[in-house]
């Protein structure tokens, strides 16, 4: 499921649900050397 549109959509829905529940922060952790994971985070609008 990695590197697919469905995985990006699932992460978006998880983030959306967290914010609907009242959370103010969503944290994504990845190794800085893991370029695909960093790119996925950036495609969702996350920054680091």
Image (tube, grey):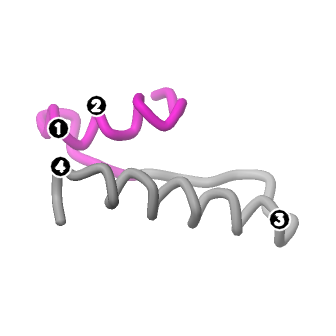
* Pointer 1 residue: 36
* Pointer 4 residue: 3
Q: Nearer the viewer, residue 38 or 20?
A: 20
Between the C-alphas of marks 3 and 1, the distance is 27 Å
Task: Kindly check if marks 1 and 4 are in contact, taking CB atoms under 8 A apart as contact.
Answer: yes
Of tags 1 and 4, the one toward the viewer is: 4
* Pointer 3 residue: 20
Of tags 2 and 4, the one toward the viewer is: 4
Task: Kindly check if marks 2 and 1 are in contact, taking CB atoms under 8 A apart as contact.
Answer: yes
Q: What is the secondary structure assignment of the residue under circle 1?
A: helix
Q: What range of the chain is rendered magenta?
A: 29-48
Looking at the image, which residue is at 41% across and 29% down? 42
Looking at the image, which residue is at 87% across and 65% down? 22
Q: Quadrant of residue 6?
A: bottom left
Q: Position of residue 2 (x, y in %)?
A: 16, 58
Q: Position of residue 10 (x, y in %)?
A: 45, 64
In the picture, measured across the screen, residue 38 lies left or right of residue 8, that is left
Task: Give the mark, 2 or 4, whose residue is nearer the N terminus.
Answer: 4
Between the C-alphas of marks 2 and 4, the distance is 10 Å
On residue 39, the disc is 2
Q: Is residue 36 magenta?
A: yes
Task: Give the mark, 3 or 1, whose residue is nearer the N terminus.
Answer: 3
Task: Give the mark, 2 or 3, whose residue is nearer the N terminus.
Answer: 3
């Amino acid at each position: 499921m990695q590197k697919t549109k469905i995985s990006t959509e699932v992460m978006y829905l998880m983030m959306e649900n967290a914010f609907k529940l009242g959370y103010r922060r969503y944290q994504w952790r990845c190794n800085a050397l893991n370029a695909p994971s960093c790119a996925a985070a950036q495609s969702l609008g996350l920054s680091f």
